[in-house]
Image: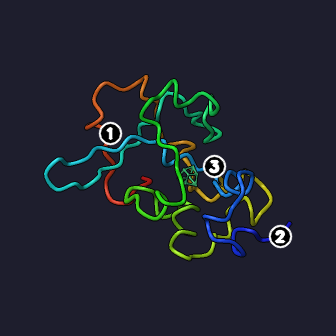
Amino acid sequence: MSRFWEDKPLEALDRAEWEALCDGCGLCCLHKLEDADSGDFFPTNVACKLLDLHSGQCSNYRHRRALVPDCLRLTPKLAHSIQWLPESCAYRLRADGKPLPDWHPLITGDPESVHRAGISVRGWTVSETAVDDLEMHILDGDARR
Ligand code: SF4
């Protein structure tokens, strides 16, 4: 396979390439709280109800925006501007002109590599269906743990 993610800017990727660029970490599907005064974001370990906490995949990707109206459809333009995308996010990395990490499934050829690297939501997140108070789930320090 050509290394399209290095050869092309985000804006030039076709639909299949764009989808393949996602590392499957699921981190963007975790709730974030925003400080209304400062605009700062506070990540939590609480996931959207549609997120499969083991695979890191949306359980209803096709209809997600009907089921979760505020689900964001990431675009090249947004990848350049959204502050809360995790630093490991492949779209953010490529928007910043950075290479994909060694554990990215496009590099390894194995979708499990993102989990083995400890980057994904597997093993430390909970579903919003099991949580009453998001503020109790704000993460300390690093955005993922
Ligand atoms: S954070 Fe980025 S790479 Fe990870 S699942 Fe979301 S869009 Fe894909």
- Mark 2, residue position: 2
- Whole-percent x and y of residue 86? 46, 58
Of circles 1 and 3, the one toward us is 3
Within 10 Å of disc 2 (Cα), the crowding (few <14, some 14-19, many 20+) is: few
Asked if labels 3 and 1 touch by Cβ distance under 8 angstroms, the answer is no
Is residue 40 depicted above or below 55 in this figure?
below
Dot 1 or dot 3: first in sequence order is 3
Within 10 Å of disc 1 (Cα), the crowding (few <14, some 14-19, many 20+) is: some
Image quadrant in which the N terminus is located = bottom right
- Mark 3, residue position: 24
Q: Amino acid at mark 2?
A: Ser
Residue 56: quadrant of the picture: top right
- Whole-percent x and y of residue 67? 51, 24
Q: Secondary structure at mark 3?
A: loop
Name the residue at the left extreme.
37
For marks 2 and 1, give the CA distance: 41 Å
Residue at 55% x, 45% y is 26
Residue 107: quadrant of the picture: bottom right
Q: Amino acid at mark 1?
A: His
The circle drawn on residue 11 is none
